[in-house]
Image (cartoon, rainbow, N blue to C red):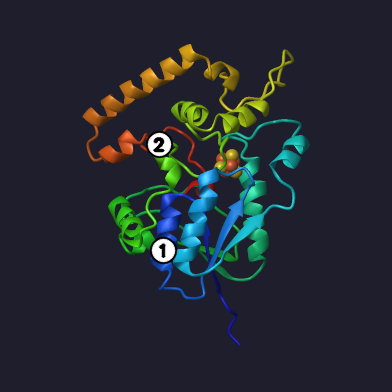
Amino acid sequence: MATKIRHILSLSGGKDSTALALHMRDRIPDMEYVFCDTGKELRETYEYLNRVEAYLGKKIIRLNAEAGFDHWLKVFNGYLPSANMRWCTKLLKLRPFENFVGDEQVVSYVGIRADENRTGYISTKPNIKAVFPFKDDKIDYEGVLKILRDSGIGMPPYINWGRTHSGCFFCFFQKKIEWVRLLETYPEEFEKAQAYEKISEKAGKTFTWIQGLPLSELRKPENINKIKHNYEEAKSKAAKQRDNRRLVEVLAGMEYDDSEPAPCLICQL
Ligand code: SF4
């Protein structure tokens, strides 16, 4: 008897994985939709996923790691995750996903668009075969927007206050301007993020989300003004030279910067 192949689509709460779920709804009837919940996600993500779930007419299975962020932070002696040490993605996103998959043969649906040229950080288990339907179906950024618009689901709501990616509220991949927006929109989340930081005189014992700029410094009015000013300058420069960049992405601060480490696909796609 042929082995049954499972079809799994991991939603992050971001626009691309959401649009992919909507796109695949009637194409793969036995699709399993999952969301790896770190327990530290943006508050709008939970509400957004409920709406997506209603549209799909199918449960989005919430996968929680056995031990959460705070547990692992203790294990790592307060060492905050960073682009070079992504223990959070590995332990809170990838591991729950891989445990859910087990050893069965799985096709994993990934929402990289036709207009993107990135690989990102995904599971490399041999029984998981990644497929990229947006690439196969030539669906680009405009195509994703159309899927979201036509379904009535729309863009993820955190875009409205200037956050560009899904994932944890303290995600180290956010840009300085996004930290400022977090402070102005959800000060209590900013406080929680700040409380994770440790400043120490001892070498190697200072842990901050942004290297060299603790949140206690970033939040000072003079620094906020500087960050906003730099952002406005970069934005008008990008708008002038945008070439084939989409102005809407630039305005939202969503331009993809190749010089920075690629964010984790499972968190932010
Ligand atoms: S969203 Fe950011 S902080 Fe959260 S698990 Fe992913 S990489 Fe880590």
Q: Is residue 12 visible?
A: no
> Local crowd at mark 1 within 10 Å, few (<14), some, or many (≥20)?
many
The residue to which callout 2 is attached is: 258
SS of the residue at dot 1? helix
Say if disc 1 is inside 8 Å of ligand 1: no
How far from the left and from the top, in percent, is residue 72?
73, 41
**Which amino acid lies under the numbered mark 1 shown in the image of this protein?**
Leu
SS of the residue at dot 2? loop
> Local crowd at mark 2 within 10 Å, few (<14), some, or many (≥20)?
few
Residue 35 placement, left or right of 68: left
Front residue (pair 140, 57): 57
Query: Which quarter of the figure is the N terminus placed in?
Result: bottom right
Picture layout, residue 132 above or below residue 81: below
Question: Considering only order in the chain, which callout, 1 or 2, is on the residue closer to the N terminus?
Answer: 1
Query: Is the Cβ of the residue at disc 2 closer than 8 Å to that at disc 1?
Result: no
- The image quadrant in which ligand 1 is located: top right
What residue lies at 46% left-to-right and 18% top-to-bottom? 224
How far from the left and from the top, in percent, is residue 140?
31, 54
Tell me the mark number nearer the camera, choosing from 2 and 1: 1
Picture layout, residue 42 above or below residue 35: above
Please tell me in which quadrant of the rendered image residue 239 appears.
top left
How far from the left and from the top, in percent, is residue 205?
72, 21
**Which amino acid lies under the numbered mark 2 shown in the image of this protein?**
Asp
Picture layout, residue 166 above or below residue 29: above
The residue to which callout 1 is attached is: 22
Picture layout, residue 95 above or below residue 233: below
What residue lies at 35% left-to-right and 63% top-to-bottom? 136
Q: CA distance from mark 2 to mark 1?
A: 28 Å
Name the mark on residue 1. Answer: none
Front residue (pair 28, 122): 28
Residue 46 placement, left or right of 28: right
**Callout count:** 2
